[in-house]
Image: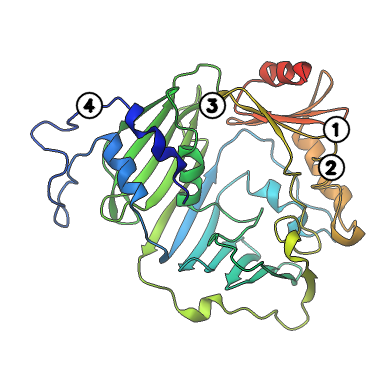
Amino acid sequence: MTRTWLRWLPAITVPAVIAAGVLAGSLPASAGDPLPAKSPEQVLQLIAQHREVSFSGTLEQTSKLGLPELPQAGPGASSGETGWLELLTGPHTARVYRDGTDNARVQVMDRLAERDVIRHGNDLWLYNSKDNTAAHAVLPAGTGSHQPSGQEAVPAPDTLAEELLAKLDPSTDVTVGAEVQVAGRAAYQLMLTPKSSSTLVASVAISVDGQSGMPLGVELKARGQSDPAFRVAFTKLSLEPPDAAVFQFSPPPGATVKELPATDHKSSGTKDRPAAKDSRHNVSGTGWESVVELPAGAWAKGPAQQPGGQSGGTGNAASLLAQATVPVSGGRLLSTALINVLILDDGRVFAGSVPLDRLQAAAAAR
């Protein structure tokens, strides 16, 4: 993790003691004992000191974003074309393996299929068992990220926590909540609460392993809702290095295999996988009120265009997207409990954890 948020540590205002009579910085607790109390600064430092790069475990993700129930894909369509939409709804289970910085595997276990993203050294494999398709890319030397890329992969808590902590600034209240148990491990609960009333996010809770500092779970609540809108957490976890065989992958017999240019490993996958959005964008606002603008046509490069000119079930994916949006002045809106996406008729896209009127104001200012 880059931990750029550490530069903000001195700006946090926190109580000196969380629990009466227990000093922060006490000796580690014995098994079954309560964790020693820590201030938010100390929990942030615990995360920053985390170096756990070898582990295996099972992740559970739940989403209650308020999206309409999407119909099943039509005949001949692959789940790959709509996987990025499917992960926004309902529960998902994934098995995650890491060993060092260049060996990682994520297996998303669907009811009737499995989707894999595997990195082994400089080799990156993407596989979808539903239609037995695979894609392979050789990563450039020096590619340091140990988290496999994949629009269809359940996010790991440490990766998601890093992205959320990057929002830390004086507009966020940071506290430590009650101790929690995650995957059988005692964890601190770092609470991030936006001060702004103009963001859809009410709070973020990051469960931090009391011994290693590894983020074990992330929970986001939307304003006006009591239940989490999004949650991902380990249900099982081993901090031992996984079996090396986990990172070995060969396409099954009969699989359709596509070789990808190294520069395309983030923008394409199996034959039906949507390309990534254009990396060029403008950002207005700050912190939790930030609005991101993507250039005209960026959204269409996702579900509307496939690598190598293949259209496959593209119309199916576009149809599902249309059903998930509602018409608004000047375009269409994909509205969730935590984020809104405004797709204008001219092709521009504005997204942020803010109400529609903020997105429209940002669009009018451009």
Q: Amino acid at mark 1?
A: Gly
Residue pointed to by mark 2: 300
Compared across the picture, whether 61 is left or right of 235 comes to: right
Which sits earlier in the primary sequence, circle 2 or circle 3? 3
> Visible in this render: residue 277?
yes
Type of amino acid under label 4 = Pro
**Element class at badge 4:** loop
Which label belongs to residue 39? none
Measure how far apart labels 1 and 3 are at the Cα level: 24 Å
Q: Residue at x 8, y 34 (%)?
A: 21
| Contact flag, marks 2 and 3 (Cβ < 8 Å) | no
Q: Which residue, given by chain and number where applicable, does mark 1 sit on?
A: 347
Left/right placement of residue 338 relative to residue 205 reads right
In the image, residue 14 lies at what x, y percent? 27, 27
User: Relative to 253, is 164 above or below?
Assistant: above
Residues at discs 1 and 2 in contact (Cβ within 8 Å): yes
Q: Earlier in the sequence, mark 4 or mark 3?
A: 4
Mark 3 residue element: helix
Q: Which residue is mark 3?
A: 288
Q: CA distance from mark 4 to mark 2?
A: 49 Å
**Mark 2 or mark 4, which is nearer the start of the sequence?**
4
Which residue appears at 40% of the width and 73% of the height? 241
